[in-house]
Amino acid sequence: MAATALKEQLNGLVNSMFAEGLLDEQFQQLQMLQDGSNPGFVAEVVTLFCEDSERILTELTKLMDQALVDYSKVDAYVHQLKGSSSSVGAQNVKLACIQFRQFCEENNKEGCVRALNVVKHEYYRLRSKFETMLQLESRIQAYENKQQN
Amino acid sequence: MAVVATETQYRVLAVDDNLLDRKLIERLLKTSSYQVTTVDSGSKALQFLGLQDDQSNSPPVSSDQHVINLVITDYCMPEMTGYDLLKRIKESSSLKDIPVVIMSSENVPSRINRCLEEGAEEFFLKPVQLSDMKRLKPHILKGKYKEQQQQEVLQNNNNTSSNNNSNKRKAMDDETSREMTRPRLTSSLTVL
């Protein structure tokens, strides 16, 4: 059955994300909160996370481009991103944010520039897998809706 | 379709400036059968709680007539922190008995102690888990009990102010009302 194959693919993807450290147990908590009455919860949270992250990364890029960097503003944004990534279970992004905050504290411009690049790299890596995940989820949902009707 | 509530529905006010965290706490609370209202700042929380007149002795009723049984708030928020919000609530005669729980992504012992000393019931480390939700009910029930006690004291004061046998009646009223409340509290607990 096509839906079963899709489900296997989805499980495989999510498991590999756990194995690679892209996701941690917090993501499992989110999965637990998704049920029949809230079938789109994970998709909603993931989408919110991506929108929020991209907004923050844009601001961070602007701030780091300044001749004189305002480290308290930078830190505030990184703190937000660390919070969101922690809430969604985005482990690698969260860890990269923790590193970034260290450099902020030291007012280390070079360190911050490098750290921002690491955060971006981890975020985009995660985002592409999230996109595949959501596509698979909606295809599975479509099959299940068809069966009910 | 008629719905019969077999259990009391408690309402929680969740305060967090992060949209994602608001979504999450809302789902956690709803999954645990709470009614939820979310706001994105301390000042909006105070507005919602109807904090205008500190002399008011009525129960905490929000603008749309809902009673708030617990406030759960993030610590790190711009302008008004969770600690500031906690202080305002505890300093208000109408709101001080509402249990307040603080959430934070940072495990800072001095911060935690400061909040507990100011009257926070508990401190949750973020990300908040489904299992943390179980820790809320005892605080809500304690808050309700305090509220009931306060209501009865007020009723007694109103009764005694216009009666000669005031002292006798007050003592009797206190006794009977306490007998009435104890069984109620126990039965609420057994519902747990």
Image (cartoon, coloured by chain):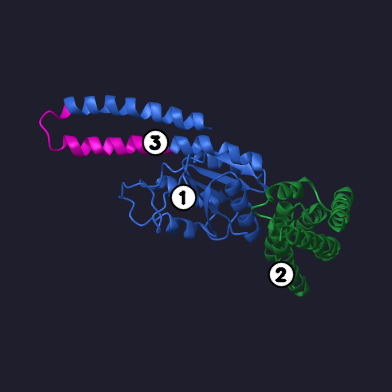
Q: CA distance from mark 1 to mark 3?
A: 33 Å
Question: What's the amino acid at mark 2?
Answer: Arg
**Which residue ends up furthest to the left in the rendered image?**
B164
From the viewer's perspective, is the residue at label 3 or at label 2 nearer?
A: 3
Relative height, residue A82 to residue B111 (above, below): below
Q: Residues within 10 Å of mark 3 (few under 14, many from 20)?
A: some
* Residue type for callout 1: Ala
Chain ID of residue with mark 3 = B
Please give the residue where the numbered disc 2 appears in the rendered image: A55
**Left or right: B65, with A94 as reference point:** left
> Residue tagged by mark 1?
B2
> What span is colored magenta in the figure?
B144-167
Q: Residue at x 27, y 27 (%)?
A: B174
Determine whether label 1 and label 3 are within 8 Å by CB.
no
- The answer for how far apart the CA atoms under marks 1 and 2 are is 45 Å
Q: Which hue belongs to chain B? A: blue
Residue denoted by label 3: B146
